[in-house]
Each structure stands twice: as structure tokens, then as C-alpha cells.
Image (tube, helix red, strand yellow):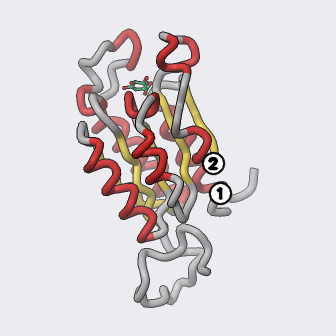
Amino acid sequence: MPPRGDTDGPGDTPDPAGPERRAVTVLILNGPNLGRLGSREPEIYGSATLADIEAACAALGAELGLDVDLRQTDDEAELIGWIHEAADRRLPVVLNPAAFTHYSYALRDALAMRTAPLVEVHLSNPAARESFRHTSVVSAVADGTITGFGPQSYELALRAVARLLNRAGPD
Ligand code: DHK
């Protein structure tokens, strides 16, 4: 089996630069209401928009040799479709499942089929909020979870993906 994240689907032609140099695509997937960032409860989620987060992740991804493909949906079925796509293409995923975090067993079961690194992220710290946010049905199938650092949670997650793919470079 090829190393996780080093292919973009069967039938790919080998890159002359070799697998170490080739940018890996990372899907950064966002669940419901995250398209409203910037105006959504800024005292909790901050003032950065998802476009701001995308720009920061694209810049960091360029440093790390990661191509970033950021998507957002309010639709559970669409999100699960993207998780299936990631599994089929062996793509690492940074996922903010938003409210689906707390109850979507369908999302959890889709993630259990993953074929590459998965890092769960949250802007806020759900453990410090309402009790219904204290449960994540996603965490158990993720490599790890980063919470509470605002937009920086995404950047830390990208660095974690780079580590998991052995692309982060020396300390
Ligand atoms: C985002 C949401 O939309 C909430 O439903 C989660 C998460 C927390 C976040 O902090 O990014 O409870």
C-alpha cells in the first residue's frame, strides 16, 4: 500500500521530483454555520472569516508542501460525500465538524473508513462550553484534536498533518 497522502488516486503518473517533493492535497472540511464566521457570535468564534482562514492555511501549506482545498457545507450528506472522496483519494483531512461533532454517528462511521491522517479542529474550546459540546463522536477516529486557538487551530492542525506525513522538517 502506498504511504498515506502520497497519492492522489489510482492511475497517477509518478512525479519526476519524487514522492518527497510532491505537494500533497489536504482537504480542510468545515461543517454547518462555519460559512458565517466573521459575523457569527464573534465573542466565541472571533472576527476572521473562513476566507481569512483559507488564505492563512494556503500560505502555511505552501511552506509545508501541502496544497489546501478548503470547503464548507451546512449539509451532512455533502460533508460525508467529501469524506468518502478523501478516503478514495487517500487524502489527509483537517475537519471542523461544527455541531455534527456532537451527534453525527453517520459522519463518525464515514471517518472510520479513512485512509490518511485526520485532525479534528475547533475554533472554540468545546470542553469549556455547554455540556452538549463536551462529547465528540469524531475524536475517537481522529489522529488528534486541536481546540480553542481560534483560526490558529487550523494552522496547528496543518502542522500536525505535515508531521503525520513526515513533511514538517526538523524542529
Ligand atoms: C463550531 C461549532 O459550530 C460548534 O457547533 C461546536 C465548533 C464548536 C468550533 O469551536 O469551531 O460546538
Residue bearing the label numbered 2: 143
**Ligand 1 located in image quadrant:** top left
Residue 152 image position (x, y, % from top left): 50, 32
- Disc marking residue 164: 1
Q: Residue, x 56% and y 12% (percent of image)?
A: 128
Q: Residue, x 51% and y 74% (percent of image)?
A: 22
Q: Is residue 103 left or right of residue 78?
A: right
Determine the CA span between mark 2 and mark 1.
Answer: 9 Å
Q: Nearer the viewer, mark 2 or mark 1?
A: 2
Q: Quadrant of the N terminus?
A: bottom right
Q: Callout 1, which amino acid?
A: Leu
Image: 8 above or below 134: below
Q: Is residue 127 left or right of residue 37?
A: right
10 Å neighbourhood of mark 2: few (<14), some, or many (≥20)? Answer: some
User: In terms of image quadrants, where is residue 44?
Assistant: top left
Indicate the secondary structure of the residue bearing disc 1.
helix
* Front residue (pair 87, 171): 87
Q: Callout 2, which amino acid?
A: Asp
Residue 116 image position (x, y, % from top left): 55, 62
